[in-house]
Amino acid sequence: MLCWVLFLDKTEPTISITVVGASGDLAKRKIFPALFVLFYEDHLPKHFTIYGYARSKLTDEELRNMISKTLTCRIDKWGNCSDKRDQFLQRCFYHSGQYNSEENFSELDIKLKEKEVGRLPNRLFFLSIPPNIFVDVVRCVSRCTSSATGWTRVIVEKPFGRDLESSREMTKSLQQYLTEGQIFRIDHYLGKELVENLSVLRFSNLVFEPLWSRTYIRNVQLIFLEDFGTEGRGGYFDSYGIIRDIMQNHLLQMLALFAMETPVSLDAEDIRNEKVKVLRSMRPLQLDDVIIGQYKGHIKGGKSYPAYTDDPTVPKDSLTATFSALALFIDNARWDGVPFLMKAGKALHTRRAEIRVQFRHVPGNLFKTNFGTDLDKATNELVIRVQPDEAIYLKINNKIPGLGMRIDRSKLNLLYATRYSNAIPDAYERLLLDAIKGEHRLFIRSDELDAAWALFTPLLKDLEEKKTVPELYPYGSRGPIGAHYLAAKHNVRWGDLSEENPEVSSYIPIHRMVE
């Protein structure tokens, strides 16, 4: 018996990854492809099994055929991609069942144990399902499909409630069956390369850290624009709107990472502690600091673009915002008085997500006559472009070569596609790998979620109770005029609109200047 115990102690672990909602769009487009990349790059354990779980009646082979269409080789030099794809698909299986059936999850448990036999079993569940069935699935997982000797973790995809009350209720319900350490609330924007690079940029570069305060920064802009509407998601989107869908999570998380104090360490809890402090220091949002809009139909270049309410799943009298701009303030010593402007919208003229840091004007600028009345030309600006064309660039004033004193703004640019040859990972690849490792740094803690909803819930209730009518803007435009008035109110100009040529490729690469 002693020999058998010693043998088990040395047994290799195995991981069983169950994608709940496997037949859905998110699972096919993001989750299975991300798992394939992790397998290809040897980030998964030697022994692993992937199960798809959904109500659809599918065989193992039908699941493999379905997901094989989305498993792509991101890097051309992957010469043995087809072989790896086949190996990966052979590790993928399917189990059909209801989301609230403990019996069906017990049947899944039997199948998982058959694959895990003789190894230390660890289990990860990714809930790619609507939030109204989160708790049912978690109950079934906890009671019927938890690992007896290894760890069990659950990834929960947003949205996490619609307001503070529903979010707290969801947290309370989940914690009936799981500990906080088992819950991984995923906001995929935290897995973006440039978002994760925020702490490196700030805390490992002496040139930036002393400038990171109200003393030198005039305003910060967090911008999220999409050049398409809600096609295919109208029914879902109308229940949430742009503020819940983008601002309360993606942009607010980016703001917290940007504005937090230096954490004690890179430990997940130390980082999340500092983010919570930022969120709790934020001034309550006021209605007069918020602009909402909704896109209307438009004809451009002979092509007709639909209005938001043309979607058959959207009520014709819907007041749901597809665009919003708002001003936030952090009432602490570092950021007192600095406006943080957010802007997010659909069906706009371009697609981008970025953070723009506008610095204060140079006191007593010797060259102010060269700028005339346009002081924005004298403004240094740091831009962190999250997508597309990931880049970090800094706008500086520079003398144009020649005998005269002519000054223009040049852009020192670190364009990732030029500087780095390796492909940028998809956000889900990084977040899935962190969940497997038990690393919570890029996942949202319950008190963090609570503080975020506490900030936005009063505003959302005001907008809904007063039936605030959104300003209409044409599909493919720059959004409502009201956004410009909001910026002007705080003595700010939207930085993304001031760039005549938004193509990052035209900027002067930093690495070329220093090499």
Image: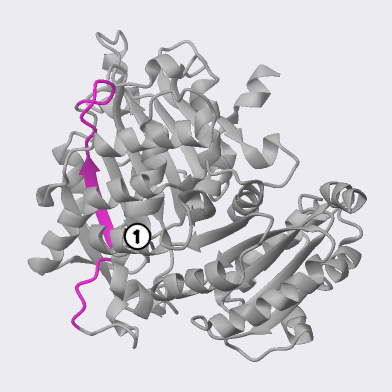
The local crowd at label 1, few if under 14, some if 14 to 19, many if 20 or more residues have their Cα within 10 Å, is: some
Identity of the residue drawn at 22% across and 43% down: 327
Quarter placement of the C terminus? top right
Give yes or no for residue 335 being in the magenta stretch. Answer: yes
Q: Looking at the picture, tell me which residue is in the foreground, 9 or 135.
A: 9
Left-right relation of 178 to 341? right
Amino acid at pointer 1: Lys
Query: Residue reaching furthest bottom?
Result: 57
SS assignment for the magenta stretch, majority = loop
Instruction: Give the answer, above or below, for where 150 lies relative to 145.
Output: above
**In this view of the protein, can residue 74 be seen by the observer?**
no
Query: Residue reaching furthest left?
Result: 466
Identity of the residue drawn at 66% across and 25% down: 511
Q: How is the image coloured?
A: one colour
Quarter placement of the N terminus? bottom right
Secondary structure of the residue carrying tag 1 is helix
Q: Which residue is mark 1?
A: 172
**Residue 72: x percent and y percent?**
75, 65
Instruction: Give the answer, above or below, for where 83 lies relative to 508.
Output: below
Q: Looking at the picture, tell me which residue is in the foreground, 20 or 511.
A: 20
Extent of the magenta region: 317-336
Q: Quadrant of residue 497?
A: top left
**Residue 457: x percent and y percent?**
21, 56
Instruction: Give the answer, above or below, for where 291 lies relative to 203.
Output: below
Left-right relation of 180 to 193? left
**Residue 160: x percent and y percent?**
37, 61
Left-right relation of 357 to 416? left
Identity of the residue drawn at 28% across and 16% down: 215
Instruction: Give the answer, above or below, for where 467 lies relative to 278.
Output: below
